[in-house]
Structures are given as C-alpha cells and as structure tokens.
Image (cartoon, rainbow, N blue to C red):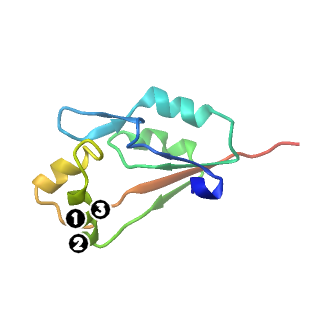
Amino acid sequence: LTARGYKAIDTDEGWSQPLPSGLQKWREDAIAELLATEDADVLFVAGCEENQAQFHSRFDHIILLSAPADTLTERLTARTAAACPAARPYLSQGHTGRAAPLAHTRHRRRTA
C-alpha cells in the first residue's frame, strides 16, 4: 500500500508492546495519536492485538483477512520471535486453524 502512495502502518513494527503471556497489545497512546493525526486522506492500519476493539469506533472499515492454515503456519514458523513475538504462543500451543489478521482503514473527509 505504501508503494502505491497510501499511508499504511503495520502495528507489529513499533506500535505494539509485549504482554507477560507472550502475546502483545497496541500501545494505546501511540495508536490514539496515530488516529488523531491529520496527515493523510486514507490510513491503513494492519494488525490484530488484544486491545484493538477499543479503537474500532475510530475506523471507517475493518476488513478481516484470512489464509489457509498451512500457509499461515509456514509463514509464522519462518518468522523469528523478534519479528513476530505474538506468533510463538499460538504455534507452541498447536493452533493450526485459520488465523485472522485485521486491516483497519480510516478515511479523512475533506471539508470545503
């Protein structure tokens, strides 16, 4: 999306913080500031974290993306814990069902 000129954020890249369980949550202060910033007509936010629901009302659209379990397992297994710390607890617990990352979008409405 960024290559096409859109502002796009992956919340795994500095927008989340680890939890003692090994999962992670959005950094609420950082996400709130991101959503309040008026520097793009459209913002794409990719990620699915423990506390994301509290921000749902601030998005125009929430899109559920999914992939076959084998594809997800292959991709998650290839990642390091540093690149995707949230993946390790799911894999270690034997989760092989369909995962569902979310893409959130917010549109800026221009006023004349």
Judge by depth and name the residue closer to the eye, 76 or 107. 76
- Residue occupying the far left of the picture: 93
Q: CA distance from mark 1 to mark 3?
A: 9 Å
- Residue occupying the far right of the picture: 112
Q: Quadrant of the N terminus?
A: bottom right
Left or right: 43, with 50 as reference point: right
Q: CA distance from mark 2 to mark 3?
A: 10 Å
Q: Please provide percent x and percent y for residue 107.
A: 66, 49
- Residue 68: image quadrant is bottom left
Q: Please say if the residues under marks 2 and 3 sit with CB atoms less than 8 Å apart.
A: no
- Residue carrying label 3: 99
Task: Indicate whether 80 appears above or below 32.
Answer: below
Task: Indicate whether 43 appears above or below 39.
Answer: below
Kindly identify the residue that appears in the image at 37 percent across and 67 percent down. Answer: 66
- Residue carrying label 2: 70
Number of other residues with Cα within 10 Å of mark 3, as a class: few under 14, some 14 to 19, many 20 or more:
some
Kindly identify the residue that appears in the image at 41 percent across and 35 percent down. Answer: 14
Earlier residue among tags 1 and 3: 1
Which amino acid does the dot numbered 1 rest on? Thr
Kindly identify the residue that appears in the image at 36 percent across and 39 percent down. Answer: 51
Q: Please provide percent x and percent y for residue 63.
A: 49, 60
Which amino acid does the dot numbered 3 rest on? Ala
Earlier residue among tags 2 and 3: 2
Q: Please say if the residues under marks 1 and 2 sit with CB atoms less than 8 Å apart.
A: yes
Which amino acid does the dot numbered 2 rest on? Asp
Left or right: 26, with 41 as reference point: left
Kindly identify the residue that appears in the image at 37 percent across and 57 percent down. Answer: 101
- Residue 112: image quadrant is top right
Q: Secondary structure at mark 2?
A: helix
- Residue carrying label 1: 73
Number of other residues with Cα within 10 Å of mark 1, as a class: few under 14, some 14 to 19, many 20 or more:
many
Number of other residues with Cα within 10 Å of mark 2, as a class: few under 14, some 14 to 19, many 20 or more:
few
